[in-house]
Amino acid sequence: MKNYTITVNGNVYDVTVEEGTGIGAAPAAAKAAPKAAPKAAPAAAKASSGAGSIKIEAGAAGKVFKLEASAGQAVKKGDTVVILEAMKMEIPVVAPQDGTVASIDVAVGDAVEAGALLATMN
């Protein structure tokens, strides 16, 4: 067992965490492995695709909710390319200028950090 002191919104909590040794530990490990595999796939797709010179990046951390554009699609400034979900809100990520989507570097369900590359344009 491990003891931790956690502060949330100014409130201090003493927490004791018991290390899992039962059946609950196996599913957690199984869930962690598939999350690593999808992250490698977009990187491989990015390397093999003709990535564009204009980067479209996540403005906030979240989960890819929907892809509104696809590679090769012409978009205008302000058109939604990807929709992220963060804290139960849908956040559209838009094209910064007119152009053509060169690559989509994420998949629906991917977790992304703020500043992560979502797509590129030409």
Image (tube, grey):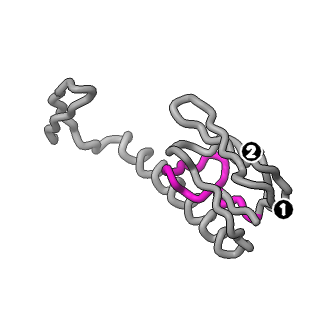
- Tell me which residue sits at (52%, 44%) in the image: 60
Q: Which of 103 and 109 is in front in this view?
A: 103
Query: Residue 64: x and y, percent?
Result: 62, 45
Other residues around mark 2 within 10 Å, as few (<14) / some (14–19) / many (≥20): few
Is residue 25 found inside the magenta-colored segment of the image?
A: no
Residue at which label 2 appears = 78
Image coords of residue 48 (percent x, y): 70, 75
Q: Dot 1: what SS?
A: loop
Up-down: is 117 above or below 61? below
Question: Quadrant of the image for the N terminus?
Answer: top left
Quadrant of the drawing holding the C terminus: bottom right
Residue drawn 18% across and 31% down? 15
Q: Residue type at mark 1: give it.
A: Gly
The spot of residue 76 in percent (x, y) is 81, 50
Q: Write down the region rendered in magenta.
A: 102-118
Measure how far apart labels 1 and 2 are at the Cα level: 17 Å
Would you place residue 79 above or below residue 121 in this image? above
Q: What residue type is labelled 2?
A: Gly
User: What's the mark number on residue 52?
Assistant: none
Q: Of the numbered discs in the image, which one, if any, rests on residue 72?
A: 1
Say which residue appears at 73% left-offset and 62% top-offset. 121
Q: Is residue 71 left or right of residue 105?
A: right
